[in-house]
Image (cartoon, coloured by chain):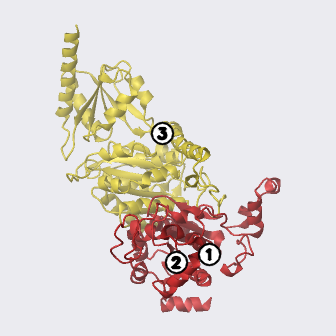
Amino acid sequence: MSTKIITPVDEFADCLPQEYKELVARGPYREPRSVEDLGTFKEIIEEHPHCAGCGVSLGIRLLAAALPSPEDTLIVGTPGCSFFGLVQTALNYSNTAFGNQNAVAAGLKRMLQIRFPHVHKDVVVVAGDGGIADIGLDLTLHSWFRQEKITTIMLDNEVYANTGGQESGMSRQGRVLNMAPQGKRFPKIPVFEMAKVSGCVYGVRVTVASPRKVGRAVRNAILVAREFGPTYVQIFTPCPTNMKFSPNQTLKVAKEAEKDHYTYEEFLSTEVATYLAQL
Amino acid sequence: MTRQQREVAPEYLFFEAPGKQVFITGSEAVAEAVKRGNVDMAIAYPITPQSESMHLIGDLYAQGYLKDYYRAENEFAVMAAVHGASLGGGRVFTATSGPGTLRAMEMFPVWAGARQPIVCAFMCRGVSLPPSIQPENIEMAMLLDTGMLMFHAEDAQDFFDMILRAYVIAEQPDVHLPAGVFVDGFFVTHTRSAVMLPPEDIKLPAYDPRRTPVPIFDMETPPMRTIRDPLLNKSNFISYLANASWHQEVIAAAERARKYIRRYMGGLLEVEDSSAKIFLAASGTAVSQSREAIRVLKDEGIQVGLIKIKSIRPFPAEEIATVTSHAELIVVPEFNMGGWLAREIKAALDNNRRVVGGPRVFGGMTMPAELIVDEVKNALRNRSRAQRSNS
């Protein structure tokens, strides 16, 4: 993308909202920015409409700051809490039918490769646990089997939050939730393990309590997807509203999970490790 | 490998290029259309009776006519992936049948709402239960209000013509909607007939992603921030109004397609023997069977006209009303149990008691001309009985 496209002509420059002017002048489009630089540039997401203490909104903010080239990034999602922040990002975002995100992303990536054979157009799926592990699981897995060059990022709050706190496949066993009145009867779906055996060439499991790790994982995953094939990042983004903890405890909950069921883990092929070491 | 084909104006391809007659199946006619359609990408999933056409399009990809092609995991994924590919600013094609159409259903209104000129061929068949792979077009009833344009081909020639014309109609900037091209499966897909084809070294002009009412999704086309205050986030009148206006614009775009359907397909319907007082009104292969019934009835001294309805969406309501203004009886034979075409016609006419919906054939049955002839004669008997009892 040329920065010309976001730069208004002089005649209209005054008419645009202040936030747009700031985006053009100080957005992260020209030079590399990262999670460490948060607070020093105009972010591509702001004023999110999520609940106080929302882990998903933090996850979106971190991943948006970590995009290696936001000016050529297209995000595909599915309806749910993740959508609320993403529709307001200053990059192309699409969500349409429930659970179709990895198929949409596959078609989009292939067409962009046809139209822009010499430009890396990064197609990134960002969706919740319900979208990826339940209603969209078959499409997720098949995009990995087919070796589509896309990155899939799961914002895992372990619940259907947007629809009012129902059990998802990623909810923990025993958790009492709507539609699981006696507690969930089976363990979290092992999507991270499935990614390893389904064709992903790079994967990270991480929580929002480790922002630098989130940033590095997202950046690596997108760069690797350009060259090698599908990549997967699973971020624990706890939900105070539905998990009934205080909104100021989100990072604490995530931190504790890192010692328990959400330990940091990374997998990558030797080829990918060599490539990343060269960067 | 890219095939050397020359881009020509649609008008030249459709109306002026020299034709050559071939004897091919409907499935082959689909591939012949896609070959000349300058299609960037096609995505396939097997279902009878659609599969053969998508095999042939796979062959076209292998020969260099398309730039990408793959077999996806199910029809919902296919329709989602062609949606994604179309968002990316290229021309796409896919096809499906009956149960595949139903499985993919959630995506069709998305295509229309996203204003994408995706062309999809529907080789109609029965839907479960009881299971049937036989020709039946009930799936068309289920797609009537998805916002897509719908054209119903009578034979392989129509199928070839309509697929290419569908791209040109659907891609007009003031239309820019998906188009379904429908045939009754097997009858058209699996039988051979004479089809006139333009030369294979010419093709439609490439899709131009700048001529769209909705910005292409490539981070090259402003605005990037497509939505500032998303419709779904807000519960207020303005968001409802914006949502409603968008729907109205989809319907208005389909209305604006009429002039292009007239230009490129010669009208939304075709009429034969417009002076008749009795009409058979049909779409798809029921038209061919009606032609035969009309011949039989003529031999018996009964004059019957034919209304062949080519465009189902937009529907030629005014044209049908005009053509039948003097008609006393309109019989509507259909390849489905629901009778959706008869409902559409009844809704378009004053004095719709003139409309008799039937015969209706489904579950794998064929529609012999005698069935239509009997329907017409029964309707005439009922009418004269009613007239006698009235007098």
Q: Residue at x 49, y 67 (%)?
A: A242
> Residue at the spot x=41%, y=71% of the render?
A133
User: Given the image, what chain letter belongs to the residue carrying mark 1?
Assistant: A
Nearest to viewer (mark 3 / mark 1): 1
What element does badge 1 sit on? helix
* Relative image position of residue B247 (x, y in whole percent): 52, 44
Q: Amino acid at mark 3?
A: Ile
Residue B354 falls in which quadrant of the image? Answer: top left
Q: Quadrant of the N terminus of chain A?
A: bottom right
Q: Earlier in the sequence, mark 2 or mark 1?
A: 1
> Label 1: which residue?
A62
Image quarter in which the C terminus of chain A is found: bottom right
| Residue placed furthest toward the top | B391
Q: Residue A74 falls in which quadrant of the image? A: bottom right
Label 2 in the same subunit as label 3: no
Colour displayed for chain A in the image of the structure: red
Can residue A141 be seen by looking at this rendering? yes
Mark 3 — residue?
Answer: B261
Q: Which mark is residue B280?
A: none
